[in-house]
Amino acid sequence: MACTNFGAANAYNVFLLGDHTQINSQAGGLVAVGGNANYRDYSVCAGLTESPTLTGLVVAGNINIVRGTNKGNTVIGFSSAVTAYSMSNLNGVRGQPLRDNPLDFAAIGTTLQCSSQAWGALPANGTVTNDFGTLQFRGSDPTLNVFTFDGSNVSGSGVSLASANGINFSIPAGSFVLANILGNNVGFGSYSITFTGDPGPAPGRRILWNVPQATAFFHRSLNIVGSVLAPFATITANGSGQINGQLIAQSYNGNTNSFQEVFVPYGGCLPEVCNAASLTLTKTANGASSFTGVPGMAITYIVTVTNSGGAPLTNVVINDSQLGIMQTVPTIEPGQQYSFTVESIVRDGKAGTSYSNISTASSDQTAAMESSSTIGIGALPVNVSLVKTVDKMSALPGEEVVYTFRLINNGNTDLQDAVLSDPVLGIRVPLGNVFDGLLYTAAFQIPRNAAPGSEFTNVARLEASNIPEPGFITATASVSVQSAPGVTLTKTVEPTEAFPGETVRYTIGVMNDSSITSRINLRVRDDYLGLDKTIALLPSSSFVSYNPEFVIPANAAAGTKIVNTAVLVTGDETQQATAEVLVASRPGLLLLKDSDRDFANPGETVEYILTLINTGNTILTGILVTDSLTGLNETVPPIAIGGRTQITVPYTVPASTPGGTQIVNTVVAQGGGIGQQTAASVLLINRIPLPPMPPEPPAVQPELRVTGTADRPVVFPGQSILFTGFVTNPTGVTVRNIVLESPLFQYIGLAEQLLPGQTIELQALFPVAPQTPPGTTITASLSATSVRTAPAEAVATVIVADLPRADLKLTVDKPEVLQNEVVTFQVVTTNTGNLVLTGVRIFDALGLRDVTIQRFLVGAILIGRARLTVNSPPGSVVDNTVTLTARELTSPVTDTVAITVYGLLLHLTAVPLVVAVGDEVAVSLTVTNPSPSQATEVRVGQLVPAITSVVAGSLRVNGASRTDDPAAGVVLGNLATSQSSTITYKLVVNSEPLGGSFDIQASASFFFPATVRQLRGLSQSNSVRIVVEEGEE
């Protein structure tokens, strides 16, 4: 016996010679329909894998298919009519349903009907009995048990196949069933089909229900176990359920019930009948089904197709993708062979592995057959090499490099018991059995005493038990020891000239001039400014700056040059940068006048005390002091910066001075580069001269009291502190000419008098510099003194708190671009707080730059740049966001810039896509302006490929006829934002192109006058390929 079974229908879950109607169900395998297909929510190939080459559904007639799925293609005949088709083909192949020549259903049907009748005539070797309504099928044949019975009256029991209570099979394990159902208008009832004892293979594979006579067959609600062959019958579903097998019939009507087909192919071997077609396929490699050899060894494959049946085989397709066989043989007669011989070699591969080579053959009459040969790969001689690389070609002394060790295997055998060693790196690594690829990586620090300009070289060794003598291989890598790459220190100050008390700002910058190498452990120091910072890592092409501020001392002399030097220490080398501030001249004089008494009698002598205080920053010379009352006219000696000069002048009150007179005495000081300064004193003459009094107890001495407060105990950098001072006269004596001083505010002032019990209030705001270190104590003092009182002073202090903060500014050089232009992003990062930030990571959303800095110092500025080619289509807005995170920051710092892409969108279509010489191609091109401003001077070109010409009068723009020659370009003029224009025209193909096809791809030039850069450019459409078929010769 030969297992031909159902021939070309053998591969199908459902194979119908006529019509197929089914709803709300699915088939697990392939479906073929020789007539019309009417489906609603019916899916095919549900149990198969999606494939673009799988033909899941074949229909020779018309189709009316609503919904459902197909994991393969749907193929219909060239003359098939499509009433509806909304099935989803899940394999992604477009244009469904496809049209082709379907199967030869007539020929296949003839064979199936012949086989069904012949198998129905085989002698029975089993019995069917009625056991209280259950049909018992008993057989003892170890291979095939044949049962034949009348479906309307089983074994004369009066019970039909449809009216039974159940079906049970009792047959030897591993055997199969051929159950011949005779009669017409018969079918299955609603019951279970079971097996007694060990069922052997899956029950559905063991039974074939053969219906050789009926033209009408039915089933009620049940699970049909086994395949049904009814090539003459229309099967009607009078119930639901499923079949675990194959359904082969004339037609199937499942319009009212849901019935599922589970693909379980029949596994029995039925005899050849009706001169059934049969195909045998064999394949050998060097004369056997398997062969072992080393890569490169010759192999002779022989693929033989034999017609082993009794009928001719037509359209025999032999395929072997690995051997390059793809052949169709029109006819192979019975007994005839067709052979291919292919010379090949054992392919590369690892020793001990194997690969299979599969050939397939099929014909119109037979299902696909497979035959394979297995090639084992033998061992080549060991041939390996060790490659040692280092991540940096050059490095600084003390810098870390990473070595990588790779094995290249030019053979195909594992190295046995391999050990990698490198004494200089201090490694010895057991690797076991290895074949190739990455073996190990090791980090190593270049010795700090390595001389710049030298080569640091070391040798690695790989040993293995199967490496030929000497049993090991070596590899060497070298690193050039370089001196520190260029680092530039700069220092500037602004302003370069300042008055005492003013604040100047220094900028001290460190630039890594190398575009490749990062620098580590750089120390920047400026002792004068109190700056001492260490830069742990300065990435390539990066810049760090510090901005310390300095207050010109109040006593800084005019003309003084404040010169200070910053020092950069890089390893054993130092670099200096100096900045200079000139102290500007600001002369100042405070003139005070007081007397030794407030009241006097006529004839008494009063002493006036004149005080001159130099409040400026230059020595005062040539100061002339005049007092008309006392006759003073004197040039005082030079007064040093901050110095004081006192002059005592006596004055005798004239005896004739009337009582009650107020003598106002004004002194004038001028010269020395200052304006005229005056001070006055008032003396009151008693109305009745009093005789000298005897000595009295000492009078109450004048006194001043000073208190001070701050509006907060703690302040953050960037905030201001409000200091308030109070000066009180607690005595009963008026205090005159009070000098008030506050060093913090560089303040010297004068209060002319303070009456008994009177208080004066002074307030001042002190701004805390942005980067003042945490813990700094800001002290404000206020002192008050006069000729008659002792100095009094009050102090208020405020502590500067921690403020972690950073500023991020992202810019782009071209915010408006054309597609494929290159832009440069720049990010400037500043530590604007007063704490060193640690674990700082700066990265952007486009993945252009990702930098980690372990310590980001206070006041430091880091500048980074990155380039991007903008590939986004016109009309796009490309956003890039830079983010900074640090351990001390509670939330990330971000900044975003946007790039607008200008240009036009061109979409081109053409039909048909396959033509012959002389045919016409209809082309449609839509040009759209997606950009945010108007495009002008729009001109479309490249419309006419070389081997074509334009059909006269075919050009249209937005439906209106145009006389332009498309070969010379078509002018569209202006396109507003979101506006489109459509160009249509026809081409005629004049000759066959080289390669059998040509492409149509248009372009459009444009100008965007509203953009900052006045953008001009060219946009391209998609490309459409037209295939030109060769003409018949």
Image (spheres, rainbow, N blue to C red):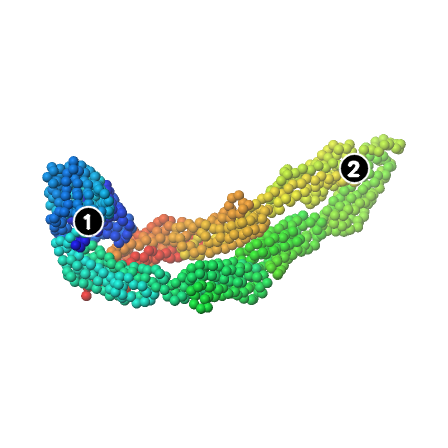
Q: Which residue is mark 2?
A: 682
Is residue 113 left or right of 900 when viewed as pictured?
left
**Separation of disc 1 and disc 2 at Cα?**
146 Å
Is residue 807 left or right of 375 when viewed as pictured?
right
Name the residue rendered at 78%, 32% in the picture.
732
Q: Is residue 799 above or below residue 398?
A: above
Let me know if residue 1020 appears in the view. Answer: yes
**In the rendered image, which quarter contains the C terminus?**
bottom left
Name the residue rendered at 29%, 54% in the picture.
909
Asked if labels 2 and 1 touch by Cβ distance under 8 angstroms, the answer is no
**Residue 25 in the image: x percent, y percent?**
23, 42
Is residue 812 left or right of 305 when viewed as pictured?
right
Name the residue rendered at 21%, 53% in the picture.
99
Let me know if residue 95 appears in the view. Answer: no
Q: Which residue is mark 1?
A: 142
**Residue 910 in the image: x percent, y percent?**
27, 55
Depth check: give the residue in front, 616 or 164: 164
